[in-house]
Amino acid sequence: MESANSNRSNSFFELGLNRNQKIYSLNDVPVLGKIPDWLNGTFIRNGPGMLNLKNRRLNHWFDAMGALHKFEIRDGKVDYSCNFLECDSYQAAIGTGDLKFSEFATDPCKSIFKKVQSYVFPSLPNMTDNPKISVTKIGEKWMALGETPMQLEFDSKTLQKIGVSEPVPGAFSYKTTAHPHFDKQHAFNLVVKFGMISYYQIYDVANPGSKPLASIPVKKPAYIHGFGMTKNYFIITAGPLVVVPIELLFWKRPYIENHKWRPQDGASLWVINKNNGKVKAYYQTDPFFCFHHVNAWEEGNEIVMDINAYDDASIIQNYYLRELEKPDSELSIGTIRRFRLNLTTKKAKSEILSNACIELPRIDYNRYNTESNYQFTYGVSLHPQQRQGFYNSLVKINTKTGENTYWFQEGCYPGEPVFYPSPKSKSDQEGILLSIVVDTESSNSFLLILDAITMLEIARAELPEPVVYGFHGEFFPSA
Ligand code: CO
């Protein structure tokens, strides 16, 4: 039993990570089951497309050259296409067979590295412009987003590059998140500005060139992948995976490896007034690490905030390819942790809502973000009976009851589940989930469509090729 599992997790690595995406398009992808007739639109997912360059393999799941995958769904039919993100780091990687820009956990070889360093920015290497993490629409522009402030605008029909923009200009010493928050005309994002004094700043990236809405000085900035927002507040959560900025100036190792886990510092949380940018409350809590915020809202004199948290930052180590390729690899278990931040007493309390493992959490964002009647979170998971290897199931967590419902199929590794409501939907489970699955039994991938109420399959669209296991997608309904 043990060895069967081991083989399976290894075959996932070869099929779902240790390969370069085949670029092709296919009309009328074979569909099993019946796609709901109301589901018309475009599902686009971002993520790694190339982890093996000609001359070297990259170190970490977050290092890859990104690729977009698109499923056009129309009248029960599905057309598929994919393309690499055609940015400078990708062109250089293709041209030289090596890395020319600094990625999350891999740096270019020293000889290339020095050349880049000297003409772009005197003290920092040229950070990747490969925005491989998420996709969004800002106004009418289709954007691929990453953690450097370089966003790639693409043509939604061809997935080809239109241009690269930098909403915070001159930002070579900045990092941002691929998880902006939306609010009518605004798209808010967190920016970390490194310097002798560093800052966490919030910008409205829908208004390029505008001043920061909030600016918090910080000595040792944390690695931050997302932030929280209620109707009236932003919430910045900084776990103790921190960097001393001077380390970045010397840049002796790849970006993330300059960060140190300092549990003795605990975690810092700031609640910031959206209207005036002032800190409303500051909290220090036990240490935790998180990539993803799930939801947050106001309740009386409290902020309630759900995040996908870990006790420490070892999950980043788990995602190195040298770890993931081990037959007995194991991932740290992330869970949904609910914080109650009292604005009067300035006390923070937290509890774990469910014992289910979850990552890449999604909610019905458009209708329930900042709303207290939100109930369900969906994500990738490790099934309780098979917690070895990579994410092998999808989970739906009822945050009110702690109840978990899984989708699991032997040998399948589903990616992030994206929720979209059905036409008469009255809750955040009345709708479907879209997920791209790596299937090691048939050595390909399929687009899975689940009923979010039952977590049972409605339909799947079978591709002839595997899709490299990725990060975040979005469904954009037809107008
Ligand atoms: Co993310």
Image (tube, rainbow, N blue to C red):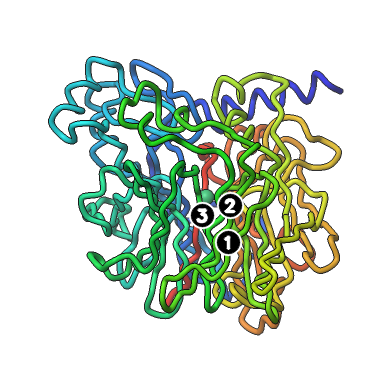
Quadrant containing the C terminus in the rendered view? bottom left
Please report whichever mark, 3 or 1, sits nearer to the chain's N-terminal start: 3
Residue 76, image quadrant: bottom right
Q: Amino acid at mark 3?
A: Gly
* Residue at 79% in and 54% down: 352
Q: Amino acid at mark 2?
A: Ser
Kindly tell me whether mark 2's CB lies below 8 Å from ligand 1: no
Kindly tell me whether mark 3's CB lies below 8 Å from ligand 1: yes
- Distance from Cα at disc 2 to Cα at disc 3: 14 Å
Secondary structure beneath dot 3 equals loop
Q: Position of residue 294 (x, y in %)?
A: 62, 61
- Which residue is under mark 1? 282
Q: Position of residue 121 (x, y in %)?
A: 18, 35
- Distance from Cα at disc 2 to Cα at disc 1: 7 Å
Q: Can you tell which of label 2 and label 3 is closer to the viewer? A: 2
Secondary structure beneath dot 1 equals strand
Please report whichever mark, 2 or 3, sits nearer to the chain's N-terminal start: 3
* Residue at 54% in and 74% down: 366
- Distance from Cα at disc 3 to Cα at disc 1: 18 Å
Q: Is residue 25 left or right of residue 373?
A: left
Secondary structure beneath dot 2 equals strand
Q: Amino acid at mark 1?
A: Tyr
Quadrant containing the N terminus in the rendered view? top right
Contact (Cβ within 8 Å) of mark 2 with mark 1: yes
- Which residue is under mark 3? 226
Local packing at callout 3 (Cα closer than 10 Å; few below 14, some 14-19, many 20+) is many
Q: How many marks?
A: 3
Q: Is residue 79 left or right of residue 208?
A: right
| Res 345 label | none
Q: Position of residue 9 (x, y in %)?
A: 69, 27
| Res 268 label | 2
